[in-house]
Amino acid sequence: MMTILSWGGIGDTLRNIGLVPHQFLFRKFGMRCRVIRLHPKPTRPLEHPDPPALFFQKLVERCPSLVWAGEIDEPKRYGRIVTRAIREAAKLLNHNTPRYFPLGFPLTEPEREALPKLAPGFVVGVQTHLSGMNTKQWGIANWQSYLSILLEADDLSIVLIDNDARVEQLCCDARIRSASGLNIFQSIALVEQSNLLVSIDSWSKYVAASQKIPQLIIAPDQRSEYPELSADYLAKNSFEGIFNQPQNSVIGLSGTFQQPQLTLDRMSDLSPRDLAQKTLAMIRRLREKS
């Protein structure tokens, strides 16, 4: 049986699951991939700890092509060699770029019925990140200004991917809906319904990548909270297969894959108008292609 490792937060796990065509293997060969989570070993106290193991167990058990295999202290080689080989083969077939496959988390009928009803037309998913890491927070006022500029300039629908109760303050127009009160599976489904995703370097970028949804990602310098998140680490790990792809745009991470640079010291350096203009430019390009 193939083995997929889970570690860190939601994004790390979705990334590793999305890099394996587990649904295809299940349909074609009846093969289910097991997911094993590594016990966290923080070298320092985390201000924003990762979800507990039970969260990831429920995440894995929702998908028919995956099997939860518990937690371990050290990764084993058994089962991972085949997984790595499949990932590398998919990379070679995708112009030597990692390929993200559909995640495959089905909704129950009540969960689907509870999703906000989005108007027909172009949908922009926006992950506002109102809580969590300080380096990713932009403030309610900035988001309000940004959303107002978008709605004044274009006829579109906006869905806010955020479970923070304050996100309701941003739903000041009938064209804005939110994921408030919804679970992770419903939030993933809302990202998948978007025509464009705008986010602040979070788990949603792997969902969008798995569905080939164009993205505008903000990548502020997060090293004050996580020193390991250098430009090189982001480009070659967190953003591998996403950074420098023609359908995506990243604010704050520039340069090449070999020589990336962090260019956004803090979220407050980004103005709502600048972000809105970049968003509208992407929307225009996408509409011209359709």
Image (spheres, rainbow, N blue to C red):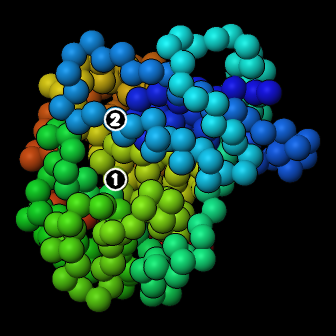
Q: Identify the disc placed on residue 50.
A: 2
Of badges 2 and 1, nearer the viewer stands 2
| First in sequence: mark 2 vs mark 1 | 2
Amino acid found under the numbered disc labelled 1: Ser
The spot of residue 266 in percent (x, y) is 13, 39
Pointer 1 local density, CA inside 10 Å: few below 14, some 14–19, many at least 20: many
214 shown above or below 18: below
The spot of residue 215 in percent (x, y) is 44, 54
For residue 4, say whether it is visible.
Answer: yes
* Image quadrant where one finds the N terminus: top right
In front here: 95 or 30? 30
17 shown above or below 173: above
226 horizontally vs 11: left or right = left
The answer to which image quadrant residue 250 occupies is: top left
The spot of residue 169 in percent (x, y) is 15, 74
Question: Which residue is the site of mark 1?
Answer: 199
